Image (cartoon, rainbow, N blue to C red):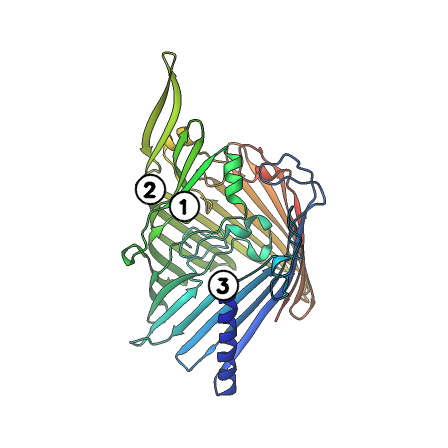
C-alpha cells in the first residue's frame, strides 16, 4: 500500500509539471457504492450460508485514471483503483483500533492497486510499428464478454460472485511488451511478450472453500514454470478485413490461468496437489454485419502440457489394507472451445443479444481416468467442458435516461439449469447512474449443475456510480 501511495504522489508531481508546460493530461475517474444482499434462506449452503436479508457484499470504490501525450508519438495511461468496506474490522480479541498515525487502517478494510500503467510509442524504430510497454489490457476477442480466445488477460474470478455488472467477465491487465505492425489500411500483425504468467485471481476465501467442500486436509499449489526469461509467455495475432468481415488468427504459448488437481492422496489425511499447467492455443475469430444483424464467432484449439497425475487410494485386498498408486494423463491431448453469437437493434429502443458457448472460462477436457479418480465432471466449477446458451434483451428510452434488461444463462448438461439476470439502470444526471439487478437461479440440480449450486443463493444488488 505504501509503495502504491508513493507512486501515486510521484505521478501527481509529474502530472503537475506536464500541465504547467505545453503538455496536457486527461484525468477521469469513478466513485461508486455497491451493495448486494440475499433474498433467500440457505443456512446449509455449499458456498454461501445466510438468511434472507443478509448482506452478500458491499464496498466503496474510487478510480482515478491519467492519460495523455508527451508528444505526437509518445502517450501514456495510468489507472489506480481503491476499495473500502463500509463495515468495521472487529475480531474476537482485538478492538477496532486506528493505525499508528491515526488513520482507520486497522479499523476499516482498504485496498489500493495499480490497475494499469503503460507507455505507447508510435512509429517505434520503423514506420507503422507501435510499441506499448507496461501493465496493459490487450484485447483478443470479438464475442460479447464470454470469449474463448482472450487468453492474454486472465478472467477476474475475484469479483465473479459479487454479481457486480461492472466486473462481469472482467479480465486483468498484464505486464507485457506489445508490438503492433500495421500492414496497409486493414491488416495488422501483433507480437506480445508477457513478463508475467497468466493467473486468474480467485474469490476471497477460495482456499478455505476448496478444502472444506472437498474434504481436503492439506493442500499444495505448484506451477509449471521457473522465474527465468525462457519461461515467459508469448502471443501472436494477425488480423485483417475480408469482404467487410473482420477476421483474425492467433497463437499463444503460456500457461493455464486456472489450477487443476493433479495429485491426490487418501490416507489418515487427504492431501491434494494443484498445478498451473503449461498451455498452447491456436485460434481464429470473425465478426461482421449482415442485413443489420451483427454476428461473431471464435474458435480455439487448446493443447495442454502433458501432466502425469497420481492418485494414492486405500483398498482392501484379500482382507489386507493396501495403498494403490495410480498414474495417468490428467488431460486429453487437445480440445476445442468456441462461441457463436448475434445481436440486433430492433428500433424503438429494443436490443437483443444471443450466444452459444462451448467451454466456460474455467473448463477443460480431462481424461477418463481423471474423471474416475478425481471425480471431475460436468456441472462443477473447474470441471469438464459444458455448453451454454446466453442471451440478453434490453430496452432503453429515447432520452437515454432509462434502461431495462433481462439476461438468461442456460446451462446445457445432464441436468439443465436456467439463471435469470434482471437489470435496471437510471441516469439521474450527467455521469451519474443508479443501477439495480439480481441473480436468480430458477431451475437446475444443486449437485449436478454449475449454476444450479446457487439455487438458494438468490441475490439482488444496488449501485450508485459517478463517472467523471
Could you say where residue 261 lies in the image, as x and y percent from the top left? 41, 38
Please name which of the two marks, 1 or 3, marks the residue nearer to the observer. Answer: 3
Q: Quadrant of the C terminus?
A: bottom right
On screen, residue 201 versus residue 92, left or right, reads left
Q: Tag 2 or tag 3, which sits nearer the N-term?
A: 3
The image quarter in which residue 63 lies: bottom right
Could you say where residue 52 lies in the image, as x and y percent from the top left? 71, 42
The foreground one among 251 and 142 is: 251
On the image, numbered disc 1 is attached to which residue? 337
Assign a secondary structure to mark 1.
Answer: strand
Residue drawn at x 29%, y 76% is 125
Query: Between marks 3 and 2, how big is the CA–CA gap?
Result: 33 Å
Residue drawn at x 55%, y 64% is 81
On screen, residue 2 versus residue 398, left or right, reads left
On the image, numbered disc 3 is attached to which residue? 115
Verify CB contact (< 8 Å) between mark 1 and mark 3: no
Assign a secondary structure to mark 2.
Answer: loop
> In the image, which disc is placed on residue 334?
2
The image quarter in which residue 442 lies: top right
Q: Tag 3 or tag 1, which sits nearer the N-term?
A: 3
Query: Between marks 1 and 3, how big is the CA–CA gap?
Result: 29 Å
On screen, residue 194 versus residue 91, left or right, reads left
Please name which of the two marks, 1 or 2, marks the residue nearer to the observer. Answer: 2
- Measured along the vertical axis of the image, is residue 344 above or below residue 181? above
Which residue, as the protein is rendered here, is positioned at the far top? 318
Mark 2 residue crowding within 10 angstroms, few (<14) / some (14–19) / many (20+): some
- Measured along the vertical axis of the image, is residue 110 above or below residue 14? above
Could you say where residue 129 lies in the image, as x and y percent from the top left? 33, 72
Residue drawn at x 65%, y 43% is 458
Amino acid at each position: 500500500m505504501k509503495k502504491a501511495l508513493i507512486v501515486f504522489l510521484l505521478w501527481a508531481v509529474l502530472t503537475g509539471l506536464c500541465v504547467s508546460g505545453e503538455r496536457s493530461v486527461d484525468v477521469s475517474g469513478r466513485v461508486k457504492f455497491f451493495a448486494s444482499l440475499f433474498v433467500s434462506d440457505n443456512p446449509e449452503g455449499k458456498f454461501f450460508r445466510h438468511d434472507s436479508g443478509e448482506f452478500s457484499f458491499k464496498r466503496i470504490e474510487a478510480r482515478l485514471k491519467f492519460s495523455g501525450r508527451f508528444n505526437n508519438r509518445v502517450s501514456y495511461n495510468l489507472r489506480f483503483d481503491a476499495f473500502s468496506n463500509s463495515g468495521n474490522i472487529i475480531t474476537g480479541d482485538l478492538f477496532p483500533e486506528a493505525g499508528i498515525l491515526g488513520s482507520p487502517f486497522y479499523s476499516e478494510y482498504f485496498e489500493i492497486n495499480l490497475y494499469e500503467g503503460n507507455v505507447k510509442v508510435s512509429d517505434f524504430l520503423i514506420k507503422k510499428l507501435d510499441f506499448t510497454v507496461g501493465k496493459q489490457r490487450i484485447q483478443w476477442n470479438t464475442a460479447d464478454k464470454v470469449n474463448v480466445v482472450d487468453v492474454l488477460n486472465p478472467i477476474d474470478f475475484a469479483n465473479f460472485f459479487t454479481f457486480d455488472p461492472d466486473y462481469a467477465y472482467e479480465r486483468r491487465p498484464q505486464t507485457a511488451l506489445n508490438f503492433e505492425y500495421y500492414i496497409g489500411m486493414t491488416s495488422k500483425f501483433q507480437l506480445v511478450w508477457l513478463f508475467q504468467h497468466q493467473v486468474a485471481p480467485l474469490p476471497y476465501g477460495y482456499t478455505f472453500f476448496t478444502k472444506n467442500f472437498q474434504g481436503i486436509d492439506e493442500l499444495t499449489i505448484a506451477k509449471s514454470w521457473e522465474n527465468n526469461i525462457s519461461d515467459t509467455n508469448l502471443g501472436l495475432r494477425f488480423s485483417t478485413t475480408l469482404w467487410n468481415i473482420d477476421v483474425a488468427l492467433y497463437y499463444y504459448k503460456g500457461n493455464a490461468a486456472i489450477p487443476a488437481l493433479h495429485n491426490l492422496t487418501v490416507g489418515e489425511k487427504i492431501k491434494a496437489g494443484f498445478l498451473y499447467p503449461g498451455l498452447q492455443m491456436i485460434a481464429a475469430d470473425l465478426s461482421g454485419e449482415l442485413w443489420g444483424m451483427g454476428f461473431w464467432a471464435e474458435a480455439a484449439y487448446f493443447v495442454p502440457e502433458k501432466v502425469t497425475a497420481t492418485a494414492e487410494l486405500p483398498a482392501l485386498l484379500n482382507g489386507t489394507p493396501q495403498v494403490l498408486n495410480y498414474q495417468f494423463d490428467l488431460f486429453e491431448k487437445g480440445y476445442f472451445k468456441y462461441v457463436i453469437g448475434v445481436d440486433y437493434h430492433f428500433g424503438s429502443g429494443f436490443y437483443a443479444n444471443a450466444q452459444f458457448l462451448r467451454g466456460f472460462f474455467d473448463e477443460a477436457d480431462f481424461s477418463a481416468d481423471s474423471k474416475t479418480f478425481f471425480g471431475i465432471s460436468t456441472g462443477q466449477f473447474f470441471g469438464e467442458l459444458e455448453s451454454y446458451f446466453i442471451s440478453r434483451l434490453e430496452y432503453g428510452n429515447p432520452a437515454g435516461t432509462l434502461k431495462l434488461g433481462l439476461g438468461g444463462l442456460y446451462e446445457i448438461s445432464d441436468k439443465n439449469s436456467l439463471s435469470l439476470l434482471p437489470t435496471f439502470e437510471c441516469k439521474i444526471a450527467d455521469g451519474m447512474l443508479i443501477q439495480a439487478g439480481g441473480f436468480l437461479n430458477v431451475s437446475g440440480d444443486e449437485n449436478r449443475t454449475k449454476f444450479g449450486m446457487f439455487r438458494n443463493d438468490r441475490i439482488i444488488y444496488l449501485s450508485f456510480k459517478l463517472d467523471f
